[in-house]
Image (cartoon, rainbow, N blue to C red):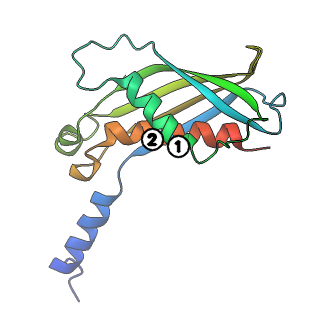
Amino acid sequence: MRNIFTSNHFFTILFAFIIVSCSTSSSSRIVKHESLTENFIIEKIVVTDSTETPPDLNIDIKNRMKESFRDKLTKYNSDNQYFSKYSIYIDIRDYEQGSAALRWAIPGMGETYLNVEATLYDENKNVVSQYRAARSVQGGGGYTAGAWKRVFDSVSSELLKNIFTKN
C-alpha cells in the first residue's frame, strides 16, 4: 500500500489549506431603485462614521472609505455634463481592523470586518436608493495581511455594482 502522505502531498494539502481562508461578503438593496434615471453620475461622496471607534486607530476610516469609493467609481462615472448628478452618503456602521497574525495564530481571532450603509440621493435631495454592504476576513495567515485595506475596496466595488446594475 502506497503512503499518500509523502512530503509532496503534505505540502500540497498544507498549501490548499493556507490559501482557503474564511472570507465573506454580503450586500442588500433596501429601497428598490426604480427611480434611478437611465443616465446618472455620482458627483458627491460623503462618508460618516457611526462606529464610535477610538481615535487611536492607525487609519482614518472615513478617508479610506471615500478614497476607495472614488477610485472604484471612475470605472462607472461618465464625463457627460447632461447626466443627472447624484450624491451618495456612506455611513460606516461597524469596522474592525483585525490582525493577520492573530488570524494565523488563533483561528477565529483577529477578524477584519467592515459594514456600511449607503444612501443615494438625486439632485433634489430625494432618496433614490439605499444599500448595505459588509465584508469580513475571519481566517488565514500572512497572506491576509492588508485585509484592513482590501475590505474597503471590496465593499466599494460591491456597492457600485449594485447601484449601476439594472435589474
**Which mark is first along the chain, 2 or 1?**
1
Is disc 1 in contact with disc 2, using a CB cutoff of under 8 Å?
Answer: yes
Residue drawn 50% across and 32% down? 134
Distance between the alpha carbons at the discs numbered 1 and 2: 8 Å
Badge 2 amino acid: Asp
Quadrant in which residue 89 is drawn: top right
Would you call the spot at circle 1 few (<14 residues within 10 Å), some (14-19), or many (20 or more)? some
**In the displayed structure image, the side of residue 108 where residue 44 appears, left or right:** right
User: At which x and y percent is residue 103?
Assistant: 24, 41
Residue drawn 16% across and 43% down? 105
Q: Identify the residue under disc 2.
A: 153
**In the displayed structure image, the side of residue 131 where residue 96 appears, left or right:** left
Q: Identify the residue under disc 1.
A: 72
Label 1: element kind: helix
Residue drawn 67% across and 42% down? 79
- Seen in the picture, residue 38 relative to 88 is either above or below; the reply is below
- Seen in the picture, residue 75 relative to 85 is either above or below; the reply is below
Tag nearer the camera, 1 or 2: 1
User: At which x and y percent is residue 63?
Assistant: 39, 25
- Seen in the picture, residue 126 relative to 35 is either above or below; the reply is above
Residue drawn 20% across and 77% down? 5
Badge 1 amino acid: Lys
**In the displayed structure image, the side of residue 34 where residue 138 appears, left or right:** left
User: At which x and y percent is residue 26?
Assistant: 55, 37
- In the rendered image, the quadrant that contains the C terminus is top right
